[in-house]
Image (cartoon, rainbow, N blue to C red):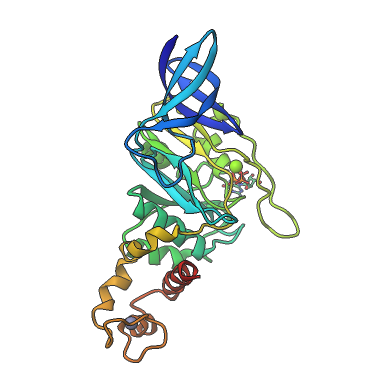
Amino acid sequence: MEILEGTVIAMHGPLVRVQAGGQTLVVASRRRLNWEGGSPPAARLVVGDRVSLELKDEDGVIVAVHARRSSLLRRAPASHRAEVLAANVDQALLVFAAREPPLKQGLLDRFLVACSLSGIAATIVVNKLDQGLAEIAPLLAVYQGLGYTVRRVSARSGWGLGEIKRLLVDRTSLFCGPSGAGKSSLLNAVYPGFRLRVGELSESTGKGRHTTSLAELMPLPYGGFVVDTPGLKEFGVWEAETGRLLEAFPEIARHMGSCRFADCRHRHEPDCAVRAAVESGGIDPGRYASFIKILDEAAE
Ligand SMILES: Nc1nc2c(ncn2[C@@H]2O[C@H](COP(=O)(O)OP(=O)(O)OP(=O)(O)O)[C@@H](O)[C@H]2O)c(=O)[nH]1
Ligand SMILES: [Mg+2]
Ligand SMILES: [Zn+2]
């Protein structure tokens, strides 16, 4: 029997595709895994997990999972349980389209919250620059004002791809965003060898058709790894983390100390400094709405 170390590159139901040294193996996983460093909130193998596997006569089985360096958590839509999208990623590229499908600020804010709470660097990538930026320019200015990095690119015309490539070298990068934003197109544009399937937008709804159905970790020829993910319609912030929500909304945190009531909930209380800042333009109304909505969901 041989013990190998590897990285999970895709999950296929009960089977796990693992990169171990130079080889790709499809293996099973032991029911009771040894989670080194303690069982995480969502104790299921995900793309990016570092694992130990036992290999006996060509048959491999995963026996242990190394402690995760990072994990991007969300609240699963139906079960409301914690779900990890990927483990051990260094950064997330939050891919949205300039016009189609329209950027949903609530979704962007939820991605930013999840990245911030898991200590994963986030870059906002606005793809389809060729569609024109006029509509979302004011929104992008809000996020740049908050200190986020915004990259404007076009997978179609090739504009801005050099910067994206530089960002990816020698790091593990998660591409996430709504269906149809062009995550797979961008990955093909930075490295055509990926040959990822891309899909048309639905003519009736203008939305993506969920072309990518499986998160997959792929090596870049110039060093580093990328994870393409299926488009997400919604992104719940995991309840256990909402206590730390203000870390992801520093512009709201800054005003809270000036509310009249110490237990102000920043909704309809008199002399609420947060609401006053929303009205005077110090806080973007969309950001405020995201903040309140995430708190409301957690309270449900
Ligand atoms: N105009 C324009 N269209 C683009 C660009 N990039 C991608 N598209 C188109 O957008 C559509 C969706 O692209 P995909 O790459 O499949 O999008 P995705 O984000 O991977 O979608 P899912 O896999 O469903 O999550 C395709 O029809 C692409 O041709 C771009 O830069 N400009
Ligand atoms: Mg895709
Ligand atoms: Zn208040």
Q: Estimate the x, y position of residue 141 in percent, counting from the top left.
A: 40, 65
Residue 241 shows in this picture: yes
Q: Estimate the x, y position of residue 1 in percent, counting from the top left.
A: 45, 9
Q: Estimate the x, y position of residue 172 in percent, counting from the top left.
A: 40, 35
In terms of depth relative to the viewer, which is nearer, 135 or 113?
A: 113
In terms of depth relative to the viewer, which is nearer, 30 or 266?
A: 30
**Going 39% across and 40% down the picture, which residue do you hit?**
39
Furthest-front residue in this view:
32
**Going 35% across and 92% down the picture, which residue do you hit?**
270
| The quadrant where residue 251 appears | bottom left
**Going 33% across and 86% down the picture, which residue do you hit?**
272
Establish if 249 lies above or below 34.
Answer: below
**Left or right relative to 3: residue 217:** right
**Left or right relative to 296: residue 179:** right
Q: Estimate the x, y position of residue 14 in percent, counting from the top left.
A: 59, 31
Furthest-bottom residue in this view:
270
Q: Number of marks in the image?
A: 0
| The quadrant where residue 170 appears | top left
